[in-house]
Image (spheres, rainbow, N blue to C red):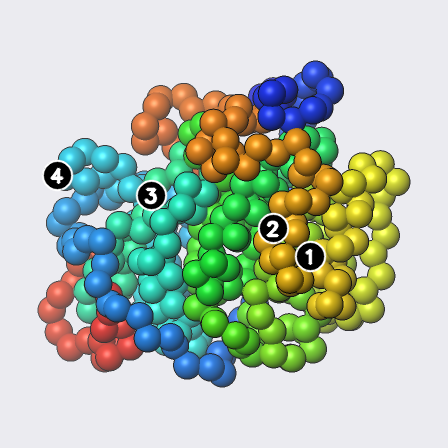
Amino acid sequence: MADQQIHNIAQDSYNVPQDSYHVPQQQQQQKYHTSIVEHPISKLPQVSSKTKGKYTLNDFHILRTLGTGSFGRVHLVRSVHNGRFYAMKTLKKSLVVRMKQVEHTNDERRMLKIVEHPFITRMWGTFQDVKYIYMIMDYIEAGELFSLLRKSNKFPNPVAKFYAAEVCLALEYLHDHNIIYRDLKPENLLLDKNGHIKITDFGFAKEVPDVTYTLCGTPDYIAPEVVATKPYNKSVDWWSFGILVFEMLAGYTPFCDPSPMKTYENILAGNVRYPNYFHEDALDLLQSLITADLSKRLGNLQGGTQDVKNHPWFSEVIWERLYNRDIETPYEPPIQSGVGDTSLFDKYPEDEQDYGNMEGEDPYAKYFQEF
């Protein structure tokens, strides 16, 4: 994506200077934020097990690998029935069980089954065989916001504001449905072909009407109450939202350290050094989000999400138009070949996978009955 330009945000929606922002030639070399997880304490919410569709591996042609993870891969696939492209997430059952991720995996399926929002990736259905579970998702062509941020180093104030506003609407929707997302970071924000946000990876999302206790998430983004193993609620997402906005504006997170334990120490200490180039409204918003005092953290007050949306930093946002995707995006992904284009994804070795095996005993069937 070298030499691509981050375009102006529409003037009729944001009062910003009419200047452009160019992506540097070379991508900065920086590791992804790595999520951590411990075994959950609380039980799963009771949710209906029906999915939007029921498929088998024979319904798709596997085209290429889009990404790899600890438990499996994500593939670009094409339906043999309607010709549409999808992302197929595969997880190896034995690894999920061994790493004590059964509850998170079932939670991800349950959460994606019940959510439907313009800025959240859609899940179409799930299935399984003896060794793997499969999730059929929307294919989002332009890849991760993380990649664009690293190539750009940091975003100008109006660009960060645009992406933050779309994320804000998604969090509002999730919280209205008593869902805590718990892993907000640029790697989990995809850009669709038009440059709009799509939140993905609901492996840590959970339906929580009051409080929960699980230590999970990504060190740089975890709220202090989670680090301190205290019960917590939806407000942890607003802390992470503040860290995300900070990173988009600064190019780094405020508590980052090569050692996760040192990162936790920094979070608990709560000392944030804000760059002097932050817009005064952005600074005020961040100080109201990145605070350990839950009685002062925006999003956790009486007005809920509305307090965040009403903050002066978002004063130019026309929320209804934003929800309807009726605002020009600041970045137009350079999609080369239209639907199904994969030019913005890294290439991975296409190792032979033992998919589709329906023979023999499945020792893990009891853990994944809803798939």
**Disc 2 target residue:** 306
Give the CA distance from mark 1 to mark 2.
9 Å
Comparing marks 4 and 1, which lies closer to the viewer? 1
Does label 1 or label 2 sit earlier along the sequence? 1
For the residue labelled by badge 2, is the local secondary structure a helix, a strand or a loop? Answer: helix
Q: Is residue 203 above or below residue 314?
A: below
Q: Position of residue 24 (x, y in %)?
A: 67, 26
The residue under label 3 is 138
Q: Which of the marked residues, 4 or 1, is nearer the chain's N terminus?
A: 4
Q: Amino acid at mark 1?
A: Leu
Q: Residues within 10 Å of mark 1 (few under 14, many from 20)?
A: many
Q: Residue at x 54, y 76 (%)?
A: 211
Say which label, 3 or 1, has the lower sequence index.
Answer: 3
Task: Tell me which amino acid carries mark 2.
Answer: Gln
Please name which of the two marks, 1 or 2, marks the residue nearer to the observer.
Answer: 2
Q: Does 71 appear above or below 360?
A: above
Residue type at the position of mark 4:
His
Per the image, the residue denoted by label 4 is: 81
Q: Residue furthest top?
A: 18
Measured as percent of width and height from the top left, residue 59 is found at 14, 47
Side of 83 where 187 appears, left or right = right
- Residue 263 or residue 292, whichever sits in front: 292
Of pointers 2 and 3, the one earlier in the residue sequence: 3
Secondary structure beneath label 4? loop
Along the polypeptide, which appears first: circle 3 or circle 4?
4
Q: Report the residue at 19% width, 40% height from top.
A: 79
Regarding residue 105, the answer to whether it shows in the image is no
Q: Residue at x 34, y 64 (%)?
A: 110
